Image (cartoon, helix red, strand yellow):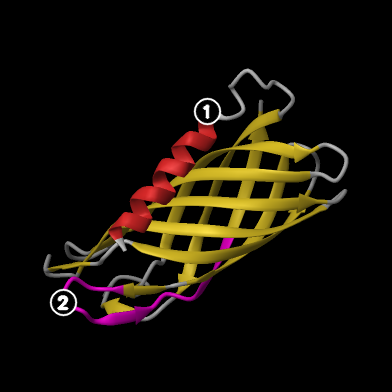
Amino acid sequence: MNKKVVLIFILFIYSIYLPASENQNYEYSHFFSLGGWFGGDKIATNPGGDNYNAGSGGIIEFGHAYKLRKVINIFHRNSLALRYQGAKEGDGENRGFVVESTLVKEWKKIAVGGGVHLDLFNRVKDQYGDSIELNNIIGTVVNLEYLFNEKAGVGIRYLFADFESKEGTIYKGNQFGFFVSVRYE
């Protein structure tokens, strides 16, 4: 599993530099998203709010996209994100580092796509500060986005993934995400 994660991460980093290579035929842009993942199996109790579920929490995401085919509007999007859920009471938290690489087809107001979702360095702490370490995961993500204009949109995503603790306990991580995105050059 870790070899796959390293390989996909290397491909992600390489894809950042691809548009900047000598081939300047790509339309290149950046994006920023705020949102959250909702669902997954309960891992720990959060007495002051939503329970800590596998892979859930708020997301702050930065990424880039480049158009692969000008005529048919297919984009390759890559992003890095911080996933975090804190606590109102106690020392609990749910956090991870998310990497996504997707292919997206855009029409005038709709974008549809899917790809690979990595959730890395996962840790859940319960209200008493006891940690549950989770293995890095590779999942599949699909997304649907409504585009207000060329610069902003709102969308939903669905993640297909299972999370596993270092002790071997399996937690279903299938869940919905809701995101608001802004694009800039």
Does the magenta portion include 50?
A: no
Q: Position of residue 39 (x, y in %)?
A: 46, 75
54 vs 22: above or below: below
130 vs 75: above or below: below
Which amino acid lies under the numbered mark 1 shown in the image of this protein? Tyr
Q: Quadrant of the C terminus?
A: top right
Does the magenta portion include 176?
A: yes
On residue 25, which mark appears? none
Are there few (<14), some (14-19), or many (20+) residues within 10 Å of tag 1? Answer: few
Identify the residue at horizontal 39%, vertical 49% (top origin).
7
Give the Cα separation between the discs numbered 2 and 1. 38 Å
- Residue marked by disc 1: 17
| Label 2 residue SS | loop
Identify the residue at horizontal 59%, vertical 55% (top origin).
179
Q: Position of residue 75 (x, y in %)?
A: 71, 44
Q: Nearer the viewer, mark 2 or mark 1?
A: 1
Q: Is residue 67 visible?
A: yes
Horizontal side, residue 30 vs residue 120: left or right: right
Magenta residue span: 164-178
On residue 167, which mark appears? 2
Q: Position of residue 21 (x, y in %)?
A: 59, 21
| Label 1 residue SS | helix
